[in-house]
Image (cartoon, helix red, strand yellow):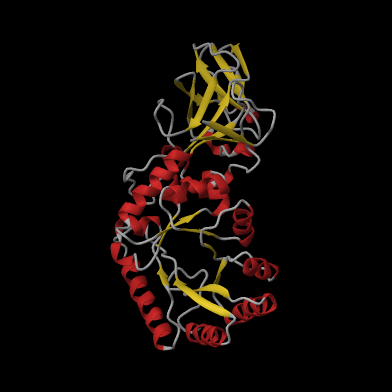
Amino acid sequence: MHSIIGRTELTDSAHGTHARIDLAAISANTSVLVSAAAGTPVMAVVKSNAYGHGLVPAARAALDGGASRLGMAQVEDALTLRQAGVEAPILAWLPWRQADYDAAVLADVELGVEAPWRLALMAEAAERNGRPVRVHLEVDTGLSRGGATRDDWPQLVEAARRAQAAGHVTVTGVFSHFACADDPGHPSVAAQIDAFDDAVRYAVTSGVEPELRHLASSAALLTVPESHYDLVRAGLALYGLSPLESGGDFGLRPAMSLRSTVAVAKRIPAGTGVMYGLTYRVPSDSTIVVVPVGYADGLPRAAGTAGVELLVAGRRHRIAGVVGMEQTVLDVGQDLPSPGEEVVLFGPGDEGELTLTELARQLDLLPAEILARIPAALPRIYES
């Protein structure tokens, strides 16, 4: 079954440039991760439009696969899920705008918090709305990004204890983020676990006992079982991508393929320059095709100079010259594809196309970085 979200002029028989999302793969990947978590509940991370896969459909697919909670950065995304009828527990860990707090309290969205002054604003919102706000206290164990430092942690814990005693706050969790979980042997992994244990121990002895302790991301879920605690957070792996520098598929299947069609096909003579700067010249008489996809659609501009090959009518052909904003040219040699034939930029690899991991390695990028570049306005076609 297919459904289309995006530009309404698309039909099932004539797709333009689009991302095809395999929701069954997201559900199956979630099930793999639930099994790997060995009884520890899994939070499905759907930040940044579910890594480009579409917030609401991906969240539902992950829940269908066994995730028990959802996590994201922004409160707006959490509210979108609530408006779509999603009832699972949701954590938004970057609620940095005061305006978010009232909406979060009313929608029963849990909030991450790293400082007493922000906790006070959340408690005020809870008091205004007549119900406590559920919070997760964030401690910085070594990433040096968000979270209270070791020196500031006692003040945050004390503020949480007082707010909880006043009935304005429920401390649901304590959490932190690994810095090097994609390299399981890195010494910082064990050091952060120790720092996290110390922070939780301090909170408990100070009268703040969280229901949930969570530290593990996808990489740690799969390779560092001692970091599982009460909850694990799965992000990249949900979408079928290895979270480790060393690779390994762990039985995961990529859920997205990015596809387009041939718009123009024409013959040009040997030596003809192609695209801006004429940095590429066809080595012999050749057919070039124009594909209506570019860096505005998520294909990095450097893919042209890196010699990236896309799949055209079942065969790989290299990009000729730089990638344009909305158009890319391919040198297909002596092949003669017709306008309308399919072009696959990346996918699970079943048809011989590049996988996203392969594309990212060619460009020295993270797979998640490429996914984040795919605009929300680009149509998504959902297969279930």
At horizontal 58% and vertical 65% (from top left) the residue drawn is 109
Residue 161 makes an appearance in the image: yes
Location of residue 66 in the rendering, given as x and y in whole percent from the top left corner: 40, 52
Residue at the (44%, 76%) spot, across then down:
210
Q: Is residue 161 left or right of residue 186?
A: right
**In the visual, does 334 lie left or right of 294?**
left
Q: Nearer the viewer, residue 352 or 294?
A: 352
Residue 54, by quadrant, is: top right
Residue 242 x, y percent position in the rendering: 38, 47
**Depth order, front residue of 218/145:** 218
**Which of 365 and 350 lies nearest the eye of the viewer?**
350
* Residue 283 in view: no
Q: Is residue 239 above or below residue 158?
A: above
Q: Residue at x 34, y 46 (%)?
A: 247
- Percent across and percent down for residue 30 are 40, 49
Task: Count the marks.
Answer: 0
